[in-house]
Amino acid sequence: MTDRVLLKGRELAVWRGDRCLFEQLHFDLGAEQLALLVGANGSGKTTLLRILAGLGLPTRGSITWKDVAISELASEQRGEIAYRGHVEALKRDLTVAENLRFHATLWGRESRFDDVLEELKLDKVAHMRARHLSAGQRRRTALAMLKLQGAKLWLLDEPTTNLDGEGRALLVEWTRRHLASGGLAVIATHQPDELAMRGALVIEL
Amino acid sequence: MGAFKAVLARDLRVAFRRWSELGHPLIFFVIVVTLFPLALSPTASQLRDVGVGVLWVAALLSSLLALDGLFRGDADDGSLEQLLLSPAPLTITVLAKVTAHTLVTLVPLICLVPLSALSFNIPFAALPTLALALLLATPTLSVLVALGAALTVSLRRGGSIVGLLVLPLTGPLLIFGTRATDLSVNGEPTAAPLLLLAALAALAVSLGPLAIAAAVKVGLE
Amino acid sequence: MKLPRWFHQLGSPPYVYRLAERLCPWLGGLGILLLAVGGFWGLVIAPPDYQQGESARILYIHPQTAYIGMMAYVVMAVAAGVGYVWRLKIAHAVAVSAAPIGAWFTFCALFTGAVWGRPTWGTYWQWGDPRIMFEALLLFLFLGYLALRGAFDERDKADRVTAILAVVGVVNVPIVHYSVEWWNSLHQTSTLLSEGGPAMTTDMLIPFLIMFAAFTLTFYWLLLRRLQAEIVEREGDARWIRELVAEGAR
């Protein structure tokens, strides 16, 4: 268990027009740590996650990854952060395998994913076009893409949506494994109890 | 470089899986080109006089037709965000997307123009200049079209405004391109406007991807 | 990079507002004075042109409005660029303020050009003339900028997206300017900057230049007034504005 803090947020404030979503937000996140973002709809969970990913700047405050501001990360360091929003980044006209292969190449990783597909029960549909997948299958494919990316920091926006019990169990297990191997995760969720783990930080917006 | 090839291959693959949509701009072009003589009922020499302008305008308008698909598809399904966040520089991935779009949409269109020129009684001898002018104009056109798509990517109804933005920017292309063709029809030297088109192309290709990537980044915020 | 102090001062809306308040009377006063002097001189005193007669008096209005239109675009593009790179809201405010003024001046240039064209060359509008075409394109660029601005809900996003458009469009400005060199057409080549010194007689040159100065000052006066209104709108309920209103009420 390392004590080094990798993700730091200082005096974060976000205003949308005249409305203040949140302010004076501080947090430190180190390796093997999980942060759970909870709050009502519209409280700013998605906005905060997007800012952590680098898709936009906070109105005030700073976020650093390994002591470098998020907006100034070198491409290698950008490769260490994975962001997953509500939509799965799947091209509907490409097959599952083609989507995965593209994603792996884009992130400069190996594209061997047969065992990942098997674990997610997607091996049978590997050559089916994404438009024919069910919502649950799309979510699992997104999980596969996450695994392939091999990132150190996971930023997930309500990842349990559309997943059945088995899928959710898999997500929890994978998160646990990710943290155990030195990774970090910030997860926005409406069901914190499911994902709560020992030592998890809870940020309530 | 691997990212460039991967994005290019992916976009081409997606485009060909929806091959029925590829024809729309081409059909639009043919329709516009047909409508003009219908409206003008010109004589043979009048046809030649207006022909050059009609062809260029029709090509410009047709290129606008497919531009929404350049970024919107990726924006809607979240792929554009992933491109932005990936280790590959956005300028490179954007260039790959624009290249794919040009190959699939603009190149077939540009090939149609010289063919249609014959139906406007444009002399055969002027066709090489026309083709060259079009070729030189294509990089600038694809950059401008992509810029329009990028600037409006986050707008719900971006389609209606994009023409307003892109067409004035293509003004110089139109003016130099038609001038080159007109000069050629009259047998005069065409070096000046062609060189200007080439200069614009060089400017567009070198600085365009930066502007487009910046527009995409701001649009996704 | 380390920026000089005045740059930071210019980034503060109350400072700029007060600076504008101090400058406006001078700009406005001098501008009106010069407009009156130059206008009278050019439209009444100066001799009619030996070729074009009385209608050449438009020389004291038309080229100036065209030039100011182009200058407005450059001001807009530079301000927008600065705002984009350094994330300065005030620079974006300048760009937004310059756009409608530039559009109007460009429209006036086209209008006065048509008015000039009719008696001189027998036509209000010549479709093939490149300078007219590019000037019209400049007007469309202004309109496109304003249209794109209006399409965004969030002001911050509108600022930054339109900044990119403004900077890209600035390529059109040198093209308008130099298009006269490249074509022989209705427009004369530059009478002012040609090789043997100005090609105009002095008694026409002086009002010509006076009107240039007059229009320039008027442009900046208009710009600062609009900028003040824009600043107040953006700052909304800020304390310095409430203090200003209270001061004014006393």
Image (spheres, rainbow, N blue to C red):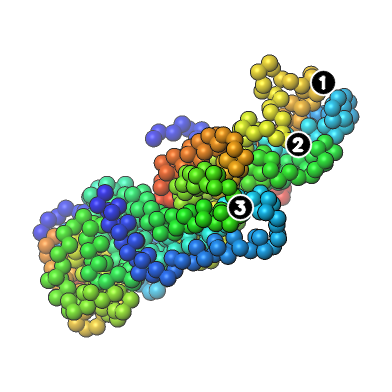
Task: Give the residue type at disc 2.
Answer: His
Task: Give the residue type at disc 1.
Answer: Asp
* Residue at 86%, 25% in the rendered image: C50
* Of the pair A50 and C122, the residue shown nearer to us: C122
Disc number placed over residue C203 in the picture, else none: 1
Q: Is residue A142 visible?
A: yes
* Extreme residue toward the bottom, this view: A165
| Secondary structure type for disc 2 | helix
Q: Which residue is mark 2?
A: C62
Q: CA distance from mark 2 to mark 1?
A: 18 Å
Q: Chain of mark 3?
A: B
* Of the pair B186 and A41, the residue shown nearer to us: B186
Q: Are marks 3 and 2 in contact (CB under 8 Å)?
A: no
* Residue at 33%, 72% in the rendered image: A92
Crowd around label 3: few <14 · some 14–19 · many ≥20 (10 Å): some
Whether residue B220 sits left or right of residue A80 in the image: it is: right
C23 to B143, vertically: above or below:
above
Disc number placed over residue B121 in the picture, else none: 3
Q: Work out whether disc 3 and disc 2 sit on a shared chain.
A: no
* Extreme residue toward the top, this view: C196
Q: Is residue C85 visible?
A: no
B48 to C45, vertically: above or below:
below
**Number of numbered discs visible in the structure rendering:** 3
